[in-house]
Amino acid sequence: MEKICPRCNTSFKCRSDNILECNCNTVILSAEDYQYIKKNYNDCLCIKCLNQIKEERQRSPKLSAVLK
C-alpha cells in the first residue's frame, strides 16, 4: 500500500499486511524510539525517517531524553 510519510511527506510502500517484507522490519529501534514515534506520528514512517530518528536519538542522549 502506498502511504505518505507524515514526517517528510515522501511517498513510500508500506507492507503492514506482511511485516516480514516491509522495509521498516530492517530498522532496529529501541523501545524509547518506538514510544517517541508513537507519541509524535499517527501513521507509518518511511525507512529514511526511521533511520534518521534512530541516528539522531543515538547521537544525542540529551535530545533522546527531551523527545520522550
Image (spheres, helix red, strand yellow):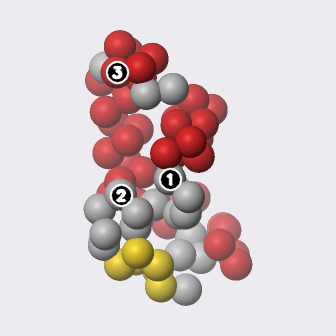
Q: Are marks 3 and 2 in contact (CB under 8 Å)?
A: no
Indicate the secondary structure of the residue bearing disc 3: helix
Looking at numbered disc 1 in the image, what kind of residue is underneath it? Tyr
- What residue appears at the point 59 percent right and 46 percent down from the top-left corner? 38
Q: Residues within 10 Å of mark 2 (few under 14, many from 20)?
A: some
The residue identified by callout 3 is: 63
Residue 41: where, in percent of width, then height?
A: 50, 53
From the top left corner, tell me how far across and down residue 11 is, in percent.
35, 78
Q: Quadrant of residue 56?
A: top left
Residue placed at 30% from the left, 72% from the top? 10
Q: CA distance from mark 1 to mark 3?
A: 17 Å
Mark 1 or mark 3, which has the lower sequence index? 1
Work out whether residue 7 or residue 27 is closer to the camera in this orientation and state it: 7
Q: Position of residue 57 (x, y in %)?
A: 38, 29
Say which amino acid is labelled 2. Answer: Arg
Query: Measured from the top left, where is residue 64 in percent x and y?
Result: 41, 23
Q: Earlier in the sequence, mark 3 or mark 2?
A: 2
Q: CA distance from mark 3 to mark 2?
A: 17 Å
Tell me: residue 19, above or below residue 1: above
Q: Are marks 1 and 2 in contact (CB under 8 Å)?
A: yes
The quarter holding residue 48 reads: bottom left
Compare residues 43 and 21 and report the one nearer the observer: 43
Residue bearing mark 2:
7
The N terminus lies in which quarter of the figure?
bottom right
State whether residue 67 is above or below residue 11.
Answer: above
Horizontal side, residue 26 vs residue 35: left or right: left
Q: Residue at x 57, y 29 (%)?
A: 32
